[in-house]
Image (tube, grey):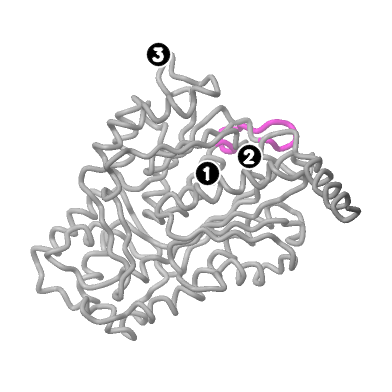
Amino acid sequence: MAATVHLAGVINESQQTPRPNGSAAVLAIGTANPANCLRQDEYPDWYFRVTNSDHLTTLKNKMKRICEKSGIKKRYFHYTDETIAAHPEFLDRAAPSLDARLRITESAVPELAAAAAKRAIAEWERPATDITHLVLATNSIAHAPGADLRVAALLSLRPDVQRTLLCFHGCYSGCSALRVARDLAESSRGARVLVASCEVVTSLSFRTPDEASPEALVAAALFSDGAGAAVVGADPESPAERPMFYMVAASQATLPGTERAMSMRLGSSGYDFGLSAEIPALLRGAIAGCLVEALAPLGLVDTGGGWNGLFSAVHPGGRAILDSCETALALEAGKLAASRHVLSEYGNMGGVTIFFVLDEIRRRQHQDGGQKEGGMVDCEWGVMLWVSARASPSR
């Protein structure tokens, strides 16, 4: 009986652990890219040369048109000419190559994620040992122990840091990681969550162009590699911690019957992407309704003035995605400038890209002088959107 009473007391005490008083906030952001950078206007010639496919002139011209219309100026890749030359199996669709690809990403993911995280921690200006939780999202690994353990070691995080690894969430993996970080930060007073997203998925998908697979050609013209990180916490300690965005609420909506509109399938020869041409139209028809459902509980429903009173951090999945959001929400010119800039300078880095967009929004706000006393960025209400039809309002 005494043991039972003691256990009950422990449970009661744990339930009374103080929680933060306010919403979680992004306290710092860091980004990183591999060194290999290729200009988009030169990419088709390079791609068809290294894959020994210059004889596919019709397909090459098609890719040139895709690249010209992509809104992308340059992209970054972990792979290099030397990587491809050392792995001829990457070019043979019939040859098993997954093991070789995963050996590359097993070391590349934690190293690139740690590079972005170091920049976020440096901006935060507190020691890495003050991090209580680590959340890492990626589509680029398939091993255990996971890349989160290696990231913790590279950053010298304390041994009892609580780690969460999110895999195979597609392009919304970064936003999923931020949502988990928000929940962790608001569940325990003093929690400081390092959240990171890293993709070197191009090393898992690079292969010879195929006339029977136009989706692969589009993917080859859009995707790139990178890493983004942020420190998230509630009740920021003033003046040391300077919140950039408050993460007020999060919601998710799934459009019925759209499971196959976007897909990533990992097989013996790496990733195969499924990208339906209907995605922009699906987005145009649903995004406004999803926003209403997400924002209504916060009293931010559009009352006739449009959505231009909010800032928008939209995942730039592609130029057509951004155009569809702009049209469906009747956004003024320039409202998606940060997303378009990131797409232009980096391409689509999957879930990583949203960290770059937030960083670009923050940079533009500083340029415009939107900074309060004490370093807090004077942000208006905003919404963070990604193609899976999620919406995470920020302030």
Q: Which mark is residue 147?
A: none
Query: Label 2 crowding class (10 Å Cα cut-off): few <14, some 14-19, many 20+?
Result: many
The image quarter containing residue 195 is bottom right
Q: Is residue 263 left or right of residue 233?
A: left
x, y percent for residue 194: 64, 55
Q: Which mark is residue 358?
A: 1
Report if residue 133 is visible in the image: yes
Front one among 143 and 138: 143
Q: Secondary structure at mark 3?
A: loop
- Residue at horizontal 56%, vertical 57%? 196
Residue depth check, mark 3 versus mark 2: number of the one nearer the observer? 3
Q: Are marks 1 and 2 in contact (CB under 8 Å)?
A: yes
x, y percent for residue 25: 65, 40
Q: Earlier in the sequence, mark 3 or mark 2?
A: 2
Which residue was labeled with disc 3? 304
Query: Label 3 crowding class (10 Å Cα cut-off): few <14, some 14-19, many 20+?
Result: few
- Residue at horizontal 21%, vertical 79%? 94
Q: Residue furthest top?
A: 304
Q: Amino acid at mark 3?
A: Gly
Task: Say if 94 sits above or below 178 in the image.
Answer: below
x, y percent for residue 201: 39, 65
Q: Is residue 263 left or right of residue 35?
A: left
Range drawn in magenta = 365-376
Q: Quadrant of the C terminus?
A: top right
